[in-house]
Image (cartoon, rainbow, N blue to C red):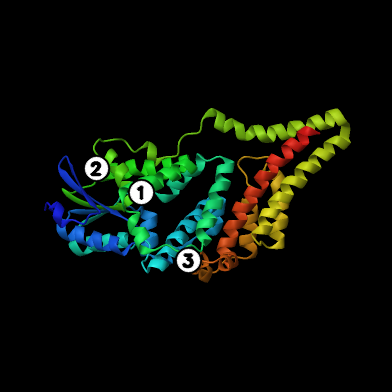
């Protein structure tokens, strides 16, 4: 059924493709009006397929609220995913806080679209790229100091007391303001915008091209609509966007150059200054990396034995690119203070205030991993020039 433009909400854009018509509903993820726009568009179009800007893990996380209870933290830490899980929690916290201010559940328009699909018999398509892959692609293209800057921005957003009004959310759905917002983000974090926004514009558009059905309603964040309109006309391969970029020969070699350089500096100290100078260099390396790694665990309010494990692990793990002091400290903290099911259930509320944030054992473990790694990494940058200067 072809819907007349006059019957569609102003947030809906009609796109004619070969053999199908796509109706892009640009939404804000904490907007009551967006929920109504989705329902009105589906009622006007009666689509064969309803596509939503979610991947399978995010969709399951929204429809199955108890999914957090089954998270295996030991596996999360061992697989190096603690930082990504913390980032996901931070993003959810930001949307949850906005949703509570506006009395709208974050992602309500996506759930409304899924409900419409069930009620009308339309096929439901999840067209977004997996969240873990997106975050890994973002992370891999950030330098160390950019990662620190990103953490700072995330924590500011999580605990900001600034209120946002409903009319401000609706204003963000206007194309010119959204383009300005994306432009500002691109200036501060060009790599993040490229991986988080631009790549997904292409991915979402191409997934829509491949979606079945002659009439398709696609529910996506309004910020993606301009980019999707540019990418949806021509077929493109998304294979490269569905994988991590292969490491170059240099990227495989340079992580080993740092430990090799440290060992060479210490050995040179023995050769030039004798045993005393060599022992001093070792003491500097152990003291600086261990202390700053332990400081990261201390800031996370970790168990004393966890702090000790961070101190002992940092000087060793910083000499091996495949290891991380935060993993050791995180596993020790998880063993000493294993979180309960109730701690996982309390995660959404724990992300809303600073005091609850640090009290939750799950978040504390993730913080231990992240901050211990940051501390030991800074220790590396401090210790190397100190040793070299001697």
Q: Is residue 338 left or right of residue 137?
A: right
- In which image quadrant can residue 383 be found? top right
Q: Nearer the viewer, mark 1 or mark 3?
A: 1
Q: Residue at x 54, y 53 (%)?
A: 82
**Residue designated by label 1:** 178
**Residue designated by label 3:** 348
Tell me if mark 3 has few (under 14), some (14-19) or many (20+) residues whose alpha carbon lies within 10 angstroms of its own. Answer: some
Q: Residue at x 23, y 38 (%)?
A: 233
Tell me if mark 1 has few (under 14), some (14-19) or many (20+) residues whose alpha carbon lies within 10 angstroms of its own. Answer: some
**Residue designated by label 2:** 209
Image coordinates of residue 254 in percent, x first then y, are: 61, 32
Q: What secondary structure is found at the residue carrying circle 3?
A: helix
Q: What secondary structure is found at the residue carrying circle 1?
A: helix
Q: Is residue 356 left or right of residue 265?
A: left
Q: What secondary structure is found at the residue carrying circle 2?
A: helix
Q: CA distance from mark 1 to mark 3?
A: 28 Å
Residue in front for this viewpoint, 169 or 98: 169
């Amino acid at each position: 059924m072809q819907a007349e433009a006059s019957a569609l909400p102003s947030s809906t854009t009609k796109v004619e493709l070969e053999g199908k018509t796509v109706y892009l509903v640009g939404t804000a993820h904490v907007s009551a009006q967006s929920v109504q726009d989705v329902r009105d568009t589906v009622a006007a179009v009666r689509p064969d397929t309803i596509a939503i800007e979610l991947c399978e893990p995010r969709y399951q996380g929204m429809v199955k609220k108890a999914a957090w209870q089954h998270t295996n933290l030991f596996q999360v830490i061992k697989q190096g995913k603690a930082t990504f899980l913390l980032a996901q929690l931070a993003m959810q916290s930001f949307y949850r806080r906005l949703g509570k201010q506006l009395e709208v559940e974050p992602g309500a328009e996506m759930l409304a679209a899924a409900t419409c699909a069930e009620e009308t018999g339309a096929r439901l398509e999840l067209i977004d790229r997996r969240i873990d892959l997106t975050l890994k692609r973002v992370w891999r293209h950030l330098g160390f100091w950019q990662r620190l800057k990103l953490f700072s921005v995330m924590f500011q957003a999580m605990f900001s007391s600034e209120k946002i009004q409903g009319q401000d959310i609706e204003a963000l759905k206007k194309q010119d303001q959204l383009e300005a917002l994306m432009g500002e983000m691109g200036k501060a974090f060009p790599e993040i915008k490229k991986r988080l926004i631009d790549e997904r514009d292409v991915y979402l558009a191409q997934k829509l091209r491949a979606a079945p059905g002659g009439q398709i309603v696609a529910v996506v964040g309004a910020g993606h609509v301009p980019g999707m309109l540019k990418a949806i006309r021509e077929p493109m391969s998304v294979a490269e966007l569905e994988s991590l970029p292969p490491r170059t020969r240099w990227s495989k070699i340079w992580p080993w150059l740092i430990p090799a350089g440290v060992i060479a500096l210490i050995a040179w100290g023995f050769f030039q200054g004798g045993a005393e100078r060599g022992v001093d260099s070792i003491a500097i390396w152990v003291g600086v990396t261990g202390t700053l790694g332990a400081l990261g665990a201390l800031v996370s309010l970790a168990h004393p034995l966890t702090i000790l494990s961070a101190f002992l692990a940092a000087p060793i793990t910083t000499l091996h690119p495949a290891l991380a002091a935060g993993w050791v400290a995180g596993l020790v903290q998880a063993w000493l203070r294993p979180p309960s099911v109730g701690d996982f259930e309390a995660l959404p509320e724990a992300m809303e205030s600073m005091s609850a944030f640090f009290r939750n054992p799950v978040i504390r473990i993730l913080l231990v991993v992240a901050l211990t790694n940051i501390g030991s990494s800074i220790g590396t940058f401090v210790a190397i020039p100190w040793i070299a200067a001697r």
